[in-house]
Image: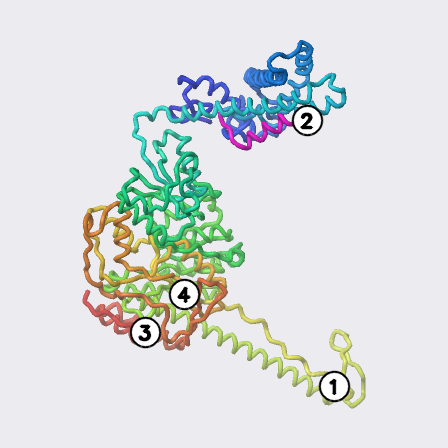
Amino acid sequence: MFRPRPGHSKRIGVSVHSKYGIWLNLFGTFGNMGNNGNGSGSPFVAMKDSNSRPFGDVTSLNRFPFGGRVDYAKVLLLGAAYSGIIIAAHWLAYLIRFEFHPPIEQQMLLCRTLQWSLPLELAFLFAFGQFRSLLSYFSLPDARRVVFACAATSLVGTVIWYATGGAHAPPRSIIILSFLLDTAGLINVRVLFRTLRERQRGRGENGKTSHRIVIVGAGDVGANLVKEMKLRRDLCMTPVAFFDDDSGKWNTQIHGVPVLGRPELLTEGKIRADKAIIAMPSASGRRVREVVQALNEARIRVEIVPSMEQMVNGVVKVSQIRPVEIEDLLGREPVCLETERISELVRDKVVMVTGAGGSIGSELCRQIAGYHPRRLVLVERCEVQIFPIEQELLALGCGAQIVPLVADIFDDERMLAVFQRFRPQVVFHAAAHKHVPMMEHQPYEAFRNNTIGTKKLAKLAAQFAVERFVLISTDKAINPTNVMGATKRLAELYIQALQRDLRRKAQGAESKAENREIRKARTAEDKSGNLEVGKAETTQNADGVGLATDARGHLPAAEPTVSAEPKLTRFMAVRFGNVLGSSGSVIPTFKKQIAAGGPVTVTHPEVTRYFMTIPEAVGLVLQSATLGQGGEIFVLDMGKRVKIIDLARQLIELSGLRPEIDIEIEFTGLRPGEKLFEEINHNTENMGPTEHPKIMRFVGEPLPLETIRHGLLAIHEKAASMDANQVKLEIQKLVPEYQPFLTSV
């Protein structure tokens, strides 16, 4: 049932007890006969009949104006208002034409012509929707419809004038003047009601202080913001100036607000402002950083509009303005994905995501669900983590697709039953232990989860002929100095070795099949050689089909046929760096430290990391899955390294504070297993491009599968009873480039 919001009228949301409320309510309710509040909707959308069924559920012929319930009194009142404007406009046209002294015969002509022109113009106004729109809502499309209605009436009047020789139509000059005055009168009345509505909108907020706002960016987005601020006085936001890099816009005005110059002028302190809004959705991250720095120097609180990708229909609203986030300053370029290929990968297929409750796993589920898989199997051993993503996907209408499972990839019976029941065709393996310092003290858990867990899942994928198996790896697997990266590297080595072993077996099976066909062909040829020369030109097979023979009556040698290639799982891994906003990211830690008043702790002044946004990384993971042929390691283009100390300073400034003055920064030293910088590839890997500019392919010579199996088995059998240092040294035997940080539990 439709219920008005508290403090609002049921019809149009303004108090009927205010100065103009009665008239606004009276004329505003006409819109409820025909739209949803913007002058262009369908009739009776929010109204209900006696059976409480929305009129929108009934066929269109039951709706106004063809039938159904109509408030005829209000229709008549609106018709009377339009009629008064039209009559006044026609009378004024005669007064102007005859210098305010129209002859009696012209006055009589006016009366005669109004008998047909008034109903005709009302009919055109009705046809162009002016009886179904709210008077107090008016925009350029409404103005066009009013012009069309008046122009149609004038056109008919001109035709009648020529057809009757002016006997039953006003003079042509009157027709032109009437058109202009009719249009101006109707539009001005609509504008008047809109102005009254806008003045009413801000009432009740007079006790609040209006904030002085400067807009950085004098484009369409900034102009729309200023327009909304001026319309909605309840926002208590007064735009005082624009700033823009385009010198061609300086010393001009937009909606009455001056464009003063570059944003750096704010540092001079000549403009008093409470808040600045950055309205440059397409600006680079570098430029946003410069503007934010200038605003921080001016001690002005700063907010930003969403990026172009985040704005709905390219239109920004004041409600979408948000504080500047670190993602805005990094300025990652939008990633172009081949959505058709990704859709082919997952559409109408069963897709499994392990670690579905984590940062990467949950985003994988969100994006995969958008490509309409037949089933999306969410595997997560922690019910607390899988619950939020399940609820989110249910809210998006994916309840028929998703299958949330609380399961541990180490539970062999459970995972075997899952594969037998759902038969996944694509597997994204995101389950892992990723916290570097924590895993340094318990390397066996990292080895067990990251390496042995991948091994178990990969064997199941090969057993059930999964089409593609994608391992989510990390840039820390490259020349690792921590056990998390080393165990991820072991997982990469295993799936590469498994891929090569499967291919060799498949090639061996093909070779045996080919040899069998060749032997059969030779046997058939030897038997046919015993036939008499020239005995017959043709022979028949068992089905009676004639077979051509040579001059000696021999059958030609059969073409060796190769059996269809066994369906092999394509194993691949995707490496990328830190993602912003993940549970283990440094960003949430910094924010908590700033909120607590500091200090902000950084391990080393020179430490750098690669950063990506979670949606960007996951989109490229899906793209990589479409490119893999099996055995590759893909590395995502992570942009430039970012200094962690710079990141800390920027977060402090975004909080409106000053580094080293309001918030101290302390250096704590590198933690166990940490490096100053991350690398891109091993020196034993060959780098090559792919079809996508943001994805690189690395191919190296894998270890023999038996070597890896024996090595993993040896570690697994002894690791539980070893101390942390011994486990790391055993892992180093399989990953020689691993430089372990030896410590104690």
From the image, tell me which residue sits under label 4: 635
Q: CA distance from mark 2 to mark 4?
A: 68 Å
Residue 132: give x, y in percent of width and height: 56, 25
Residue at 48% across / 67% down in the picture? 690
Q: Main secondary structure of the magenta part?
A: helix
Mark toward the viewer: 3 or 2:
2
Asked which secondary structure carries label 4, the reply is: strand
Q: Type of residue at label 1?
A: His
Say the numbered circle drawn on residue 735: 3
Mark toward the viewer: 4 or 1:
4
Q: Is residue 145 magenta?
A: yes
Q: CA distance from mark 4 to mark 1?
A: 59 Å
Say the numbered circle drawn on residue 602: none
From the image, tell me which residue sits under label 1: 554
Q: Type of residue at label 2?
A: Leu
Magenta residues span 136-151
From the image, tell me which residue sits under label 2: 155
Would you place residue 528 above or below residue 424 in this image? below
Q: Nearer the viewer, residue 541 or 641?
A: 641
Residue 409: give x, y in percent of width and height: 37, 60
Q: Is residue 178 magenta?
A: no
Mark toward the viewer: 3 or 1:
3
- First in sequence: mark 3 vs mark 2: 2
213 relative to 70 in the view: left or right? left
User: Quick one: which residue is furthest to the front in this view?
Assistant: 99
Would you place residue 384 above or below residue 210 in this image? below
How packed is label 2: few (under 14 Cα within 10 Å), some, or many (20 or more)? some
Q: Are marks 2 and 1 in contact (CB under 8 Å)?
A: no
